[in-house]
Every structure is written in C-alpha cells, then in structure tokens.
Amino acid sequence: SYELTQPPSVSVSPGQTARITCSGDALPKKYAYWYQQKSGQAPVLVISEDNKRPSGIPERFSGSSSGTVATLTISGAQVEDEGDYHCYSTDSSGNQGGIFGGGTKLTVL
Amino acid sequence: QVQLVQSGAEMKNPGASVKVSCKASGYTFTDYYIHWVRQAPGQGLEWMGWINPKSGDTNYAQKFQGRVTMTRDASIITAYMELSRLTSDDTAVYFCARGTVYWGKGTLVTVSP
C-alpha cells in the first residue's frame, strides 16, 4: 500500500531554518499539503498544493517538491512553531484516496 | 465564516457502533467534499474517507471498507460518519474536514468495556 514517510522528529534552535521532508512515490504527480498541529487542537493547513501559503500563515513557512520528496521549510523558526507537522497527499491509484505521513515533531529550543 | 461543529464525546462498548455528526455553516454545503480523519492517542492522522455532499458518493480507505458508512443530510447541512464493530483500537479523536482547509474540533470516541 502507498505510504508517505516523514522523519519522527526535527530539532532546531530559535532563528534557525527547520526542514521537514515527506517522501512518497506518487509525489511527482500529486500535490503535498502540510498541516501544523498543536497538542489537543485540530490541524491547521500551513502549505497547500506543494507551495501555496494560505492566508494568515506567516511568510517563514514555505513548501517545495522535487521528485518523490516534498519539503516544508520554516525559515527563522520561532518557539511558537513547535508542534507536530503532518504531510498529506492523494494516492496514485486514481480513486482519489487520501493519505497522511506519520507526522514529525518539531522542537524549537 | 466557515464552521464545522461536531457532536460530543462518546463512550462505547466493544462491538458497538458510533455515529459522529458534523454540522456545516458559512458556505454552500454541497460545494465541497467532507473528509473524515482520525487520530489515536499519541499517534498521527489517519484518513478514513470522504463524502460528496452533492451526490452522496463516498470513497473509503481500504482499511475501513465494510465497517464505515459516511452519509449526509443536506436539508440540515450535516455530514455523518458511522463506524461499526468497534474495538479498543478505534479509540481516537475523529475529525471532519471541508476539503483540505477547514476542520472541526474533533470528537473523542472511547471504546472500553
């Protein structure tokens, strides 16, 4: 079955650049979406369609995709950016099913 | 503004079924798919399926085929997700989402004898 693979954790100091990757065989043909989730809250979309930033999301969040890897970049990470980040995409089978990566815990300290 | 208001927490016995509701407001209900996603304690997000509120067409993740039913009642702008034959592994927060952007706050379903 199709999978999206993320690193379990990423750690950076405040002001540094955090990069979180998401690997999947269908990513060359399918968009990646990125969600931020803080404890006890619903996920919040921070990047859509590989690299589009929704209204209200800080400019330090950006996305890119190359080949089978999508990347979420947080330039100048802030303490408030700590949380879990999940990538989402659709599978390549044509049935438009969705799939999430396993999630990455970002620590900023 | 777009809002998705979900029903309250549920506690169920193993083998029972649960039905979670998701009431939409702030947009045309039939214009956007409703997705259901769950999150077990300490785990990642798991996509369960979607329903097209306009046609009623559904698409379920293979893992839940035969056990999940997604429906909608457009007259009261509400989508439903029913999961049957519950086990302790189904203990999770269940979210509805309008497309990829707007999410409900989640409904905790606890399965315990």
Image (spheres, grey):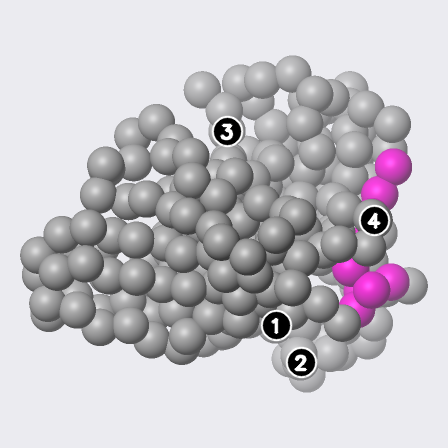
Left or right, A71 with respect to A75, comes to right
Q: Residue furthest front?
A: A67
The magenta-colored residue range is B57-65
The relative height of residue A58 versus residue B45 in the rendered view (above or below) is above
Chain letter for the residue marked with disc 3 in the picture: B
Q: Which residue is mark 1?
A: B91
Chain letter for the residue marked with disc 2 in the picture: B
Q: How far, Cα to Cα, is label 3 from label 4? A: 28 Å
Do callouts 1 and 2 point to residues on the same chain?
yes
Pointers 2 and 4 in contact (C-beta within 8 Å):
no
Number of dots carrying numbers = 4
Q: Which residue is mark 2?
A: B88
The answer, for residue A95, to whether it is visible in the render is yes
Chain letter for the residue marked with disc 1 in the picture: B
Q: Which residue is mark 3?
A: B3
Pointers 1 and 2 in contact (C-beta within 8 Å):
yes
Q: Position of residue A101 (x, y in %)?
A: 54, 65
Magenta highlight on residue A78: no
* 2 vs 4, front mark: 4
Mark 1 Cα-neighbour bin, 10 Å: few <14, some 14–19, many ≥20: many
Pointer 3 or 1: first along the chain: 3
Label annotation for residue A95 = 4
